[in-house]
Image (spheres, coloured by chain):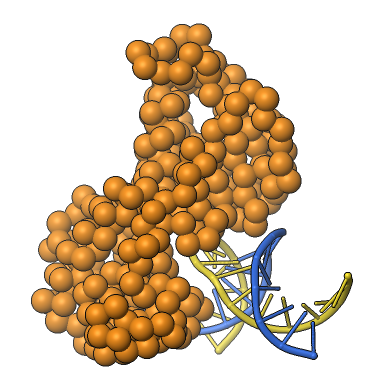
Chain colours: A orange, B blue, C yellow
Amino acid sequence: MPELPEVETIARQLDSALRGRTIKSVTLLKTGREAPTGKKFIACLEGKKIQRVVRRAKLLIWEFADGSAVLAHLKMTGRFVFADKTYQPAKHDRAIFEFVGAHAMRPGRAAHAPTLVWSDIRQFGFMRCVSKEEKEKTLAAYGPEPLEATEDEIARCLEKPKTRKIKSALLDQATIAGIGNIYADEALFRAGIRPTRRLSEITRADRLRLAREIKILLKKSIRLRGTSASDYVDASGAKGSFEKHLRVYGRGGEKCLVCGTPIKRTVLNQRGTHYCPQCQK
DNA sequence: AATGAAACCTGACAGC
DNA sequence: TGCTGTCAGGTTTCAT
């Protein structure tokens, strides 16, 4: 399930391949509830030149030269994967994008224009055309980016409301952007904080340690192109390799790698939550 | 106001 | 073999 490192990985790949390219055609294969007006969606995209592709929180943002943009969210099972011209649509594909290749060529770039496939098994994701104003309004609702904010800024985001559980705060995109279930559990383990602790029960030293661990964790995962705990693959179809560095997520009942105590699995905010009862207080 | 839970959706898997 | 039930989870929406 794509969280910040996975979305960042895809954003870099899309930016590298699509920057400066013009969208030649959009083929919509499924018009779910997130794309109810297919013709309008296509009209918003075809002929537009992609200025760059960036990530904010877990959103992929295709920015166009005219200031408008597409916001894409992969949710749990969404994928953007490059294909070749002979690609045959598969069961869960939602759209196929083709690009003009003749101009906007740069040294080292493939001679042919790329074909991009958007697929989503569970159909939860969305792509949405927005104006510059809509884009800015949407992005402003997110909390700070953990890799851009300072440790002190992150720590201060995690002070209130006091009765909130720390894991709930980490998952709240308006509190801090980009962290999902996997990295919330992993960051709390590395900081030695139990997911159920209330914010009022966490010291400033705890908060700063957690902020530091979040940054280290996310940076390391980006270097390894993310975690493929379930469906995630990057834009080249490759799995991320951070999975082997997970210390608690998905390890319920197994021994803690630090102290040997069995990792506990509970449910918090309707999410599977994993922690070491010995290392995390 | 803040928190919790349902809903969205499909595939994988366990159990019978 | 094939059925049923449960689980996975990001975000929005609705209820408490």
Q: Position of residue A118 (x, y in %)?
A: 59, 40
Farthest-out residue, top? A102
Q: Position of residue C15 (x, y in %)?
A: 61, 82
Q: Position of residue A231 (x, y in %)?
A: 55, 56
Answer above or below: position of A151 versus A57. below
Given residues C14 and A96, the one toward you in this image is A96
Q: In the rendered view of the protein, which quadrant contains the C terminus of chain A? A: bottom left
Given residues A129 and A242, the one toward you in this image is A242
Identify the residue at horizontal 44%, vertical 85% (top origin): A253
Given residues B2 and A185, the one toward you in this image is A185
Identify the residue at horizontal 28%, vertical 69% (top origin): A187
Answer above or below: position of A235 versus A272. above
Q: How many marks?
A: 0
Q: Is residue A178 visible?
A: no
User: In the visual, does A181 lie left or right of B7?
Assistant: left
Identify the residue at horizontal 21%, vertical 50% (top origin): A148
Answer above or below: position of A18 versus A130. above
Identify the residue at horizontal 15%, vertical 61% (top origin): A151
Answer above or below: position of A268 versus A242. below
Q: Position of residue C13 (x, y in %)?
A: 59, 66
Q: Is residue A10 visible?
A: yes
